[in-house]
Amino acid sequence: MTRGSTPPLLVVDTDVLIDYLRDHSQAVAFLEGSEQPLAASVITVAELYAGVREGEERLRLDAFFAAFTVLPLDQQPAQRAGLWRRQYAPSHGTGLADALIAASAEAAGATLVTLNRRHFPMLAEVLVPYAKS
């Protein structure tokens, strides 16, 4: 990276954000220590809200995403995701949500941060920040 340039964006997958929201020490250390800008796919937002409980947990999630960059998804990345899902589901277990998150990261020119490298063979820029214990 050259002096004065913006560090590359990190798109954080759902699994890492779940760990962070559950105060998993490695996730907290990674995200709070990151010097790179952080983002999440709109698909990750949907996944997390699908499992949130009303009350304090919902309020915490609302506040979390209010302070987070959320990447939208439009037709071209959605088409790419569908083709990736078709190609990689049999060999890598890539689901539609994972393919959409990958397409969001690719469209943003970002590195994907995930605990499950196997689901993202279509991306060259993948970072596994810690091993799940």
Image: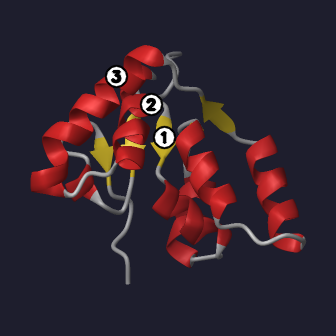
SS under mark 2: helix
SS under mark 3: helix
Residue in front for this viewpoint, 30 or 102: 102
User: Dot 2: within a 10 Å radius of its alpha carbon, few (fewer than 14), some, or many (20 or more) residues?
Assistant: many
Counting the numbered discs, the total is 3
Quick one: label 2 or label 3, which is nearer the N terminus? 3
SS under mark 1: strand
The vertical placement of 111 against 129, above or below, is above
- Which-is-in-front pick, marks 1 and 3? 3
The vertical placement of 89 against 21, above or below, is above
Which residue position is annotated with label 3? 79
Residue in front for this viewpoint, 65 or 42: 42
Which residue position is annotated with label 1? 11
| Residue 89 rendering spot, x and y as whole percentages | 19, 50
Q: CA distance from mark 2 to mark 1?
A: 8 Å
- Horizontally, residue 122 falls left or right of residue 80, namely left
Q: CA distance from mark 1 to mark 3?
A: 19 Å
Q: Which amino acid type corresponds to the residue marked 2 in the rendered image? A: Ser
Q: Residue at x 81, y 42 (%)?
A: 66
Do the residues bearing badges 2 and 3 touch, measured as CB atoms within 8 Å? no
